Amino acid sequence: MYRLILIFVLTTTVFSGICCAEQMALKEPITVNGDKVEYDPEEKVMVGTGNVEVLYEGMALYADKITVWLDEQQALAQGNVRLVRDETTFYGEEISYYFEENKGKIIEPSFEKHGPWYGKGVEAEEYEKSKYLIKKAYITTCDLEEPHYKLQAKTVKAYIGDKIIAKNVIFYVRNIPLLYLPYLKYSLKDKKMPFMIIPGNNDDWGWYLLNSYRYYLNDNSKGRIRLDYREKKGIAHGVDHEYKTAFGDGIIKYYYMNEKDSEFSDNDRFKVNFRHHWQPDSATSIYTEYNKMSDIDFLKDYFYEKEYEKDPDPQTYFYLIRRLPYATLNLNINKRANHFFTEVERLPEVGMDISDLRIKDSNFYYSSQVYFSNLTNKTANSDSDDDVWRFDTYNEFSHAKRYFGFLNFSPYIGIRQTFFSKNIDGDEHKIRGAFYTGFDTSTKLYKVGVPKGEKFLFAEANAYRHTITPILRYSYVAEPTMLRTTLMQFDEIDEIDKKNKITLALENLWQIKTGEGDDVKKRDILSFDASADYDFKIAGGSKWGEATLESAYMPLDWLGFTSEAKYDLHPGYFNTASLDMVLNQDRWQLGIGQRYERDTSSQTTAEFKYRINEKWQFRVYQRYDFQNSCSERQELTIYRDLHCWDAKFSFVNNRLDGNKSFFVVFTIKAFPQHPFRFSQSYNPPGS
């Protein structure tokens, strides 16, 4: 291949007839490679043909033929043209490129991997470096010549590595228009789908259509607009707006609907949420949140999965934390915003925590907590409230040391003094005292060995290590000078009672090593942990409490077992138990689980997935309850790879409520967390 490097800024004459006065000052040389490169010194024109490559300032231009005019500092690429810039590849029938301005113009352009996007248009112009204007264009995440779906727009502005802005956008599936957006601004740093459409039908809402659009103003201001229709409820709208300022970042949400045939006054149902975080300096953090709802059932009716299940009673509060060299200061203001909830108000609560402050160079440590609280227990839908002023202090001294080179022993003593403005009978100015003591002790025992036959617990291994960690904890709280039954109950401080308990725990871990030299790999193969409490303060005598047993066993990369159980030692029976087995092969996965809860249920679940080929998979799920001798739930799901989409077809038979549901879910692979759902039964979406 003939190669020519052309440098526009010369100190010597490279070609006869070209003088220094005629050279154009560019930032760096242009490299031209091609099967054949010719130069005309009179016209100052260079022509490359056959696999031509032009390189300049991080830009690479490829074509069958490229002509470079030196005076105009311009190149024209023709035939199989590619322009590679900032990890994005543009294709076109013809590209004009201007070296001095470092920008170009593309005829019939197409581009790939602009973030997750592909696109095509009639004409594209790089009007500034890494900024393109594409006319009569479409964008999509489908890489086919005829994409399965696309967003077609009158104009698209593409900012390499930053964002895409489009106007007069129509969303097409194949050639069917489904949605119109006058304006679309999408950040390439955002991996979420810009819009979501969820049609469906259920008994509560009738036919419904849930729509949301993600807007992007800039990195500091973006969000989602919601517009929903429910046949039996009416039209609802809302906004989720995320922001960042010099005084912190947060999110504001509201959602409102005028519900048809509502049992609530004026048919108005809504929620308003505000959450903000500000860190004015490295030692100070401020958190605040406000949650207001029209009624107690609003989240359950409309935001069940994402909000109600996580927090059915969201709090309203202001919290400030200040970290000092040896302590932490806290300010907490908690105010009830919804009268239909029972909540404890703290107006305010101020405190200081000192944690494990070492006393000089000794093995003694000091911890302290000092809190002043103005507490009010606000009862739901009632004017009957309990309130108290409380000043609580706790001071603890502990000692931590390793004895005999293997035994960790840490005893402690503590004193708690608490002032109450009144007790449950209204008697004022009461002080309660409580004495604490106890210790933690533990050690680690090791055994290292080489397995016979290079097998250990059925796994390939060169060596193994067994670690045993016995733990003993003792905790004692003397009977407080005021019984908990004489105090109003707000939190765990008011619940303090006599305590005399020992906790025994034993942790076992088996690890194996495979390979040699740089290929050595270590992994956990088996763990077994057991713990139990012995309580000396039991009416009628002492007794062992509930024991917890946990284990995990993974003999092979594709085979694993886990179990967890709670065993009541005194009567001698399991309260709860669970066992899971997972097999994971290339084309199939099998999971079997057993759940037991005494006097309540005993369930077996089984799940099987199988990949038929690159396009098709299926999943079968079954849950059987032995307590009721019936199959509670059955699911059949078929998966189909649609190139740029994933489709999931599911049938669910829930025998507990007699409902049968059919789901169809389409997911764009570039945005797997935001699917399109078509269903007869659908849990309302959250945020």
Image (cartoon, rainbow, N blue to C red):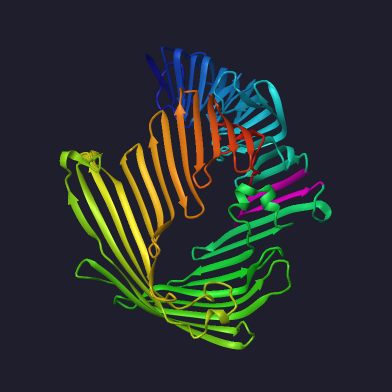
Q: Position of residue 45 (x, y in %)?
A: 50, 15
Residue sitting at x 46%, y 48% = 595
Image check: 615 left or right of 198? Answer: left
Q: Is residue 220 above or below residue 170?
A: below
Of residues 61 and 259, which is closer to you in this image? 259
Figure disc tally = 0
Snapshot quadrant of residue 90: top right
Q: Is residue 247 magenta?
A: yes
Of residues 378 and 361, which is closer to you in this image? 378
Residue sitting at x 39%, y 65% = 570
**Res. 399 visible in picture:** no
Of residues 679 and 129, which is closer to you in this image? 679
The span picked out in magenta is: 233-260
Residue sitting at x 58%, y 32% = 650
Snapshot quadrant of residue 235: top right
Q: Position of residue 223 (x, y in %)?
A: 65, 45
Q: Position of residue 668 (x, y in %)?
A: 57, 31
Q: Is residue 192 above or below residue 321?
A: above
Image check: 461 left or right of 252? Answer: left
Q: Position of residue 617 (x, y in %)?
A: 49, 27
For the stretch drawn in magenta, what is the main secondary structure? strand
**Res. 522 visible in picture:** yes
Residue sitting at x 21%, y 56% = 446
Of residues 652 and 365, which is closer to you in this image? 652
Q: Is residue 475 magenta?
A: no
Q: Residue furthest right?
A: 266
Classify the position of the N terminus by image quarter. top left
Snapshot quadrant of residue 337: bottom right
Image check: 18 left or right of 273? Answer: left
Q: Is residue 130 above or below residue 687?
A: above
Image check: 656 left or right of 601? Answer: right
